[in-house]
Image (cartoon, helix red, strand yellow):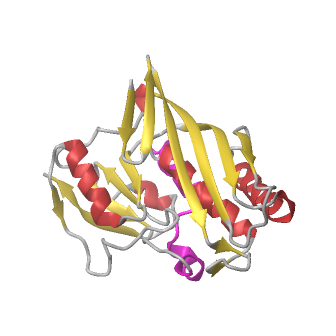
Amino acid sequence: MIEKYRDLIIIYEKDRAYVISCDSLGAIGSKEHDVVKVDEEIVGRTTIKVALAEALCLGAKPLVIADTLAVEMKPTGEKIISAIEKELKENGLEDVVLTGSTEENFPSSMTGLGITVISRVNLSDLKIKKVKKGMHISLLGYPLVGDEVLKYPDYVLQLKDYVEISKSKEIIEAVPVGSKGIKYELGILEKLAGLKINANIPSHINILKSGGPATSCIIVHEKKIPSITKIINKPLTYMGSFI
C-alpha cells in the first residue's frame, strides 16, 4: 500500500515501510543572482537537513539520498556535495548511499538543488497516527527563514537534534515546521488524529510564519515537560494538548 502523509510518501511492505522525503532550494548561495548570499557549505548542510528531518521524525533510517543540482559540478557542485557528505558523517549517517546529477550543458547564475531521501522503518517504530487525548504539544526551536537562520543559530534545530528526536521514545510524533507554518502543521495533526487541540500558544510565536529550513519542530509527548530538553539545547515552547 502507498500512502501520502503530509509531504511524504510511505510505501508499506509487510512489517516495515519505506519513506520518501524531499526538499528543494533556490536563489540561496554565492552565485551572481542568488538572493540570499551564503557559502556552498551552508547550502549543502541546510538542504540535506530538511529532507532528512522529515524522515527522521517518522523514526525512519535513511538509506539513499539523491541530490539533483542545477549547478555545474566544478566548483559549485563539488562544494555542495562535500558539505552533504560531511553533514552525514558528523551525524553517524555515513553509510547512506549518495547519488545525484549536475547541470553541465548550460551555465547557471543562480543556485538551485533538490534532495530526495529514501528511508526505511519497522512498522512498530513508525511515528505516525499514534496521538491520543491528553497528549501534549510543544515546539522545539523557533521558525526562522532567510538571514534569520544565520543570525540566530541558538534557536535553530540541527541535524543532530533530529537524530535525537528520531531515537526518543518519549516523543510520540514529530513534525518539522515547513514553509506553510505552525498553524498549518497543527491543522494536519488534528485532522490525522481526529482530535482537537486546546491551544495555548505564547504571543511571541508566529504560527503563520514559514519554518524555513526545518529550524523548528512540533513534538507530541505524554509528559507535559519532556526530558529531551536535557539532550537538545534549544528553546522549548509549550503549545497545548489534544482534547
Q: In which quadrant of the rendered view does residue 40 lie?
A: bottom right
Res 224 visible: no
Tell me where residue 106 appears, x and y as whole percent: 78, 61
Residue at the farthest right position: 74
Residue at the farthest front position: 106
Determine the residue positioned at 45% across, 64% down: 216
Task: Give the camera-side residue of 73 and 93.
Answer: 73
Residue 86 vertical placement versus 65 (above, below): below
Tell me where residue 190 appears, x and y as whole percent: 21, 50
Tell me where residue 121 appears, x and y as whole percent: 50, 31
**What is the total number of numbered labels drawn onto the structure image?**
0
Q: In which quadrant of the rendered view does residue 99 lie?
A: top right
Left or right of 70 on screen, residue 234: left
Tell me where the magenta segment starts and ends, as one range.
Answer: 147-168
Q: In which quadrant will I find the N terminus?
A: top left
Q: In which quadrant of the rendered view does residue 140 lie?
A: bottom left
Determine the residue positioned at 48% across, 60% down: 230
Residue 126 vertical placement versus 170 (above, below): above
Left or right of 19 on screen, residue 29: right
Left or right of 156 on screen, residue 41: right
The prevailing secondary structure element of the residues shown in magenta is helix
Residue 51 vertical placement versus 107 (above, below): above
Task: Give the camera-side residue of 171 and 6.
Answer: 6
Tell me where residue 125 appears, x and y as whole percent: 43, 32
- Is 81 within the magenta? no
Res 128 visible: yes
Task: Give the camera-side residue of 84 and 104.
Answer: 104
Residue 126 vertical placement versus 109 (above, below): above
